[in-house]
Image: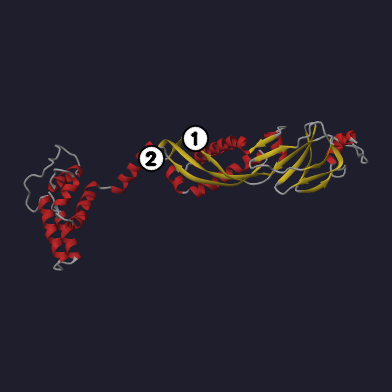
Amino acid sequence: MALMDFIKKQFIDILQWTEDGDGTLAWRFPMAEMEIQNGASLTVRESQVAMFVNEGKVADVFQPGMYKLTTQTLPVLTYLKNWDKLFESPFKSDVYFFSTRTQLDQKWGTPNPITIRDKEFGIVRLRAFGIYAYHLVDPQAFYQKISGTRDRYDREELAGQLRNTLVAGMTDLFAESGVPFIDMAANQEEFGRAMFAKMQPVFAEYGLALDSLVVQNVSLPEELQKILDQKIGMNMIGDMQRYTQYQVANSIPDAAKNEGGMAAMGVGLGAGVGFGQVVGQAMAAALPQGGAAPAVTAPAATAGSLSPDEVVATLEKLHGLVEKGILSQAEFDAKKVELLKKLT
């Protein structure tokens, strides 16, 4: 009886794969020196595919379901082994299971900035990152090109290859599209769709289907981002002289409400510097440089013009009249414009 039990253990009656963790893409059934019993049961669960391989050649592929292994259910293997239709003996074959579950939240990104030519900025270095998802659809292609005869092939082993492939595709997409970096960064969803379409055939070569691809961020390295921010700021400011006048005029009503009145503005703008001098310096820096450099402090006022201190004092008085209801806000604004034109 002990000898019979030993003989029975050499034959496999049930073939199945119960996944013991997450991330395994391919798993080979442990055959050792055992043989598969003719009429054995094969169970392929949902989100799995099973494949028989005979002496390195792919034979029969099974989708989810339960099968009785005979010459009828193994036509390719029967042909490769030249079995008779009445063959009922145990047999040897490698059996691989593949997971077809969607592999979610896979990260991709540029480990280092990549160099591209941009229409607006010339040669720039940029970073990008996002997430993607995929699943296995062609076990034969995956076996032949990726997993091979290994006992197990995990998702993490493939992550580096897929990530680098995505980065290379993104670089090519930038070069082919010719879209400026600013427009690309502002339309990340559209960029993601274009990248998804470009990478689908690449994944298919590995026996995979790319389910989704999201671009979460496209940016410049920190040092280049500072330069870009400065350029955007200059474009927003435009005419520096008008910008300076606007800033001075709009700060007067708020300063007048604070304790200390207009004098508090001088303290906020610079310790030990009178408010009139600060305004004069700001105006002098904003004016075009031609001939001799303009003096920081204003000379004697010309006819029809006022010094910054006089303008500030007048506006403070006018603002007080607005608060008392003597002047309307519209009248104050009109007078403010008139006075600002008289700045020396």
Disc 1 residue type?
Pro
- Residue placed furthest toward the bottom: 325
Q: Is residue 93 left or right of residue 239?
A: right
Q: Position of residue 182 (x, y in %)?
A: 42, 44
State the separation of the CA atoms marked 1 and 2.
18 Å
The image quadrant that residue 91 belongs to is top right
Mark before the other along the chain sequence, 1 or 2:
1
x and y percentages locating residue 223 in the rendered image:
37, 36
x, y (%) of residue 106?
A: 57, 42
**Local secondary structure at mark 2:** helix
> Which quadrant is the N terminus positioned in?
top right
Residue situated in front as seen by the camera: 81 or 249: 81
Q: Residue 208, percent across and down? A: 65, 42
Q: Residue at x 78, y 46 (%)?
A: 43
Callout in the foreground (1, 2): 1
In the image, what residue type sits under mark 2? Gln
Residue 59: which disc?
Answer: none
Q: Nearer the viewer, residue 13 or 206?
A: 13
Locate residue 66 relative to residue 89 in the image: left or right.
left
> Observer-nearest residue: 143 or 240?
143
Mark 2 crowd level (few <14, some 14–19, many ≥20, 10 Å Cα)? few
Residue 237 position (above or below residue 10): below
Residue 82 seen in this snapshot? no
Q: Residue at x 54, y 36 (%)?
A: 168
Name the secondary structure under disc 1.
loop
Q: Which residue is mark 2?
A: 225
Q: Quadrant of residue 152?
A: top right
- The residue labelled by disc 1 is 111
Task: Specify few, some or many for label 1: CA neighbours under 10 Å numbering under 14, 14-19, or 20 or more.
Answer: few
Q: Are marks 1 and 2 in contact (CB under 8 Å)?
A: no
Determine whether, in the image, residue 210 is placed left or right of residue 332: right
